[in-house]
Image (cartoon, rainbow, N blue to C red):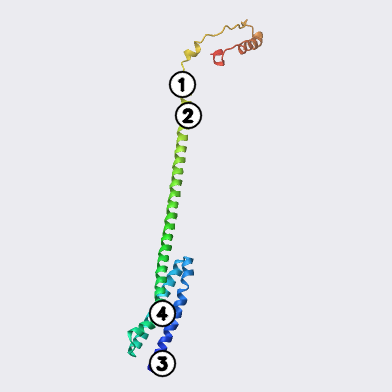
Amino acid sequence: MTEGSEDVKLVADLNAKLKLLKFTRDKTGSITTGSIITAMERHLKALNTVLDDVDGLRRNVEQSKFERGEEPEAVAEWGAELDGEIGKTDEAITALKNAITEVRSNQIGREREKEHALKEKEREEQLLFEKRKFELKLEYEQKLDETRKSQGQGHAQESKPLKTRVNSKLPELKITKFNGSASNWLTFWNKFEAEIDKSDLAPTTKFA
């Protein structure tokens, strides 16, 4: 392979890589808009790989030109357009890195918001639980207190002195006297019950 053919091959390889670089870089906008971290990171890696390949081939071509005796000004002029494409790619890489950082930050923020919302929900549920537990305890204590009071009143009524109840002023009762004849006992008893029942005394007083 002659020296001239080697230069042609290097330039052809460089041009092919440069087209690939432009093609890859043009996808950056749509991939960034998608905001998918894995896709963005993969694209960033691809951009860097192709850019490194372009830069390596460029240096090989520049070296070949210097070996042929070309002046630095001529080599710089040849690479001016290439510098512009590399600069655009560097800007795309920087923008892509910033977008990745922003998406990650947003994801972390959303995760923190979810975590905060979950903790807040758990806290509210715990407060409701404690409130309900307190209400049930209060209801239980109120019912228990009512039961004790009710039982206490019952005991108090049962323990009243018999004398107090017995010494109440009794109304005058007119009761038929039994004449002692066994044959008249049933008639007497029925009349006695009727006279007692129509009186205003409480049952415990009638037969105390």
Front residue of 10 and 176:
10
Q: How many angstroms separate mark 3 from mark 2 (CA)?
A: 110 Å
Of the numbered discs 1 and 3, the one sitting upstream in the chain is 3
Whether residue 91 appears in this view of the structure is yes
Q: Nearer the viewer, mark 1 or mark 4?
A: 4
Q: Is residue 81 above or below residue 152?
A: below
Task: Look at the picture and state if 185 lies above or below 60.
Answer: above
Which residue carries the number 1 mark?
A: 156
Instruction: Please give the residue where the numbered disc 2 appears in the rendered image.
Output: 146
Residue type of the residue flagged with mark 3: Ser
The residue under the point 34% across, 83% down is 73
Marks 4 and 2: CB-CB under 8 Å?
no
Q: Tell me which numbered mark, 4 or 2, is placed earlier along the sequence.
A: 4
Numbered disc in front, either 1 or 2 = 2
Depth check: give the residue in front, 174 or 64. 64
Q: Mark on residue 81? A: 4
Q: Nearer the viewer, residue 84 or 1?
A: 84
Estimate how packed mark 4 is, as few (under 14), some (14 to 19) or many (20 or more) residues with alpha carbons within 10 Å: few
Amino acid carrying label 2: it is: Glu
- Per the image, label 4 sits on a secondary structure element best described as helix
Find the distance from the CA under tag 4 to the CA under tag 2.
97 Å
The answer to which of marks 1 and 2 sits earlier in the sequence is: 2
At label 2, counting other C-alpha atoms closer than 10 Å, the crowd grade (few under 14, some 14-19, many 20 or more) is few
Three-letter residue code for mark 4: Glu
Q: Is residue 197 left or right of residue 20?
A: right
Q: Which mark is residue 5?
A: 3
| Mark found first going from the N terminus, 1 or 4 | 4
Closer mark to the observer between disc 1 and disc 3: 3
Residues at marks 4 and 3, CA–CA distance in whole angstroms: 23 Å
Q: Earlier in the sequence, mark 4 or mark 3?
A: 3
Instruction: Decide: is 87 above or below 164.
Output: below
| Front residue of 100 and 25 | 25
